């Protein structure tokens, strides 16, 4: 009798929905309380890709042959005296790490080239690779000319700063001081 009653409920969709409704009402009466959270419409005005990327401390390395990569700072660990260190990057025979900068995934990195051009990337835009990886060619990340190379990298937290400056010196002895905010409108 009990099995035939259950089969009848399963056969009739209306009976099934009524049974589910009754059981949910019982649960609500037994365990339910007032809503603790408030539902608001339109709480987020605009969501950027960067809002979905966690902010973490990173290390960006650039090799002499223009291979670039990023690693989380947690990849490296402090050592005591006499430590042998860990390998931070595999390189080709004639290659070596020429530049290293620590920053955050949400901060800017300015790349200055041998032709006097400057490029800007966010930390998260540099590909994260393994510690053993040699990196990827920097031309895959920044559109450089054939004979153009990265001369230096600088990590900048706030490109709108009124108080921070960069000082440039040329081979011919010219010195120029530029406000960091002048680099805010650089395209990739």
Image (spheres, rainbow, N blue to C red):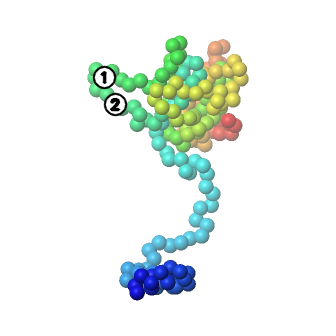
User: Quick one: quadrant of the C terminus?
Assistant: top right
Can residue 58 be seen here? The reply is yes
Residue 148 lies, in percent from the top left, at: 68, 21
Closer to us: 184 or 66: 66
Residue drawn at point x = 63 percent, y = 35 percent: 120
Residue drawn at point x = 58 percent, y = 65 percent: 43
Is 187 above or below relative to 37?
above
Residue 161 lies, in percent from the top left, at: 58, 41
Q: Cβ–Cβ below 8 Å for labels 1 and 2?
A: no
Residue 49 lies, in percent from the top left, at: 60, 49
How much space separates mark 1 and mark 2, taking CA atoms? 9 Å
Q: Is residue 147 left or right of residue 57?
A: right
Question: Which residue bears the numbered disc 1?
Answer: 83
**Helix, strand or loop at mark 1:** loop
Q: Is residue 140 left or right of residue 16?
A: right
Question: Which residue bears the numbered disc 2?
Answer: 78
């Amino acid at each position: 009798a009990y099995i035939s009653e259950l089969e009848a409920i399963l056969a009739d969709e209306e009976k099934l929905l009524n049974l589910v409704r009754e059981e949910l009402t019982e649960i609500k009466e037994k365990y339910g309380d007032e809503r603790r959270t408030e539902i608001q419409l339109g709480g987020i005005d605009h969501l950027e890709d960067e809002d979905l990327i966690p902010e973490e401390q990173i290390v960006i390395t650039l090799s002499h042959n223009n291979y670039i990569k990023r690693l989380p700072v947690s990849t490296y660990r402090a050592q005591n005296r006499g430590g042998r260190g860990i390998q931070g990057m595999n390189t080709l025979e004639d290659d070596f790490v020429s530049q290293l900068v620590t920053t955050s995934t949400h901060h800017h990195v300015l790349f200055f080239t041998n032709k006097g051009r400057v490029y800007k990337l966010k930390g998260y835009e540099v590909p994260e690779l393994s510690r053993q990886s040699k990196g990827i060619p920097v031309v895959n990340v920044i559109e450089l000319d054939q004979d153009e190379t990265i001369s230096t990298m600088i990590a900048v937290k706030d490109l709108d700063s009124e108080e921070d400056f960069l000082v440039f010196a040329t081979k011919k002895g010219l010195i120029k001081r530029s406000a960091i905010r002048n680099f805010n409108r650089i395209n990739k």
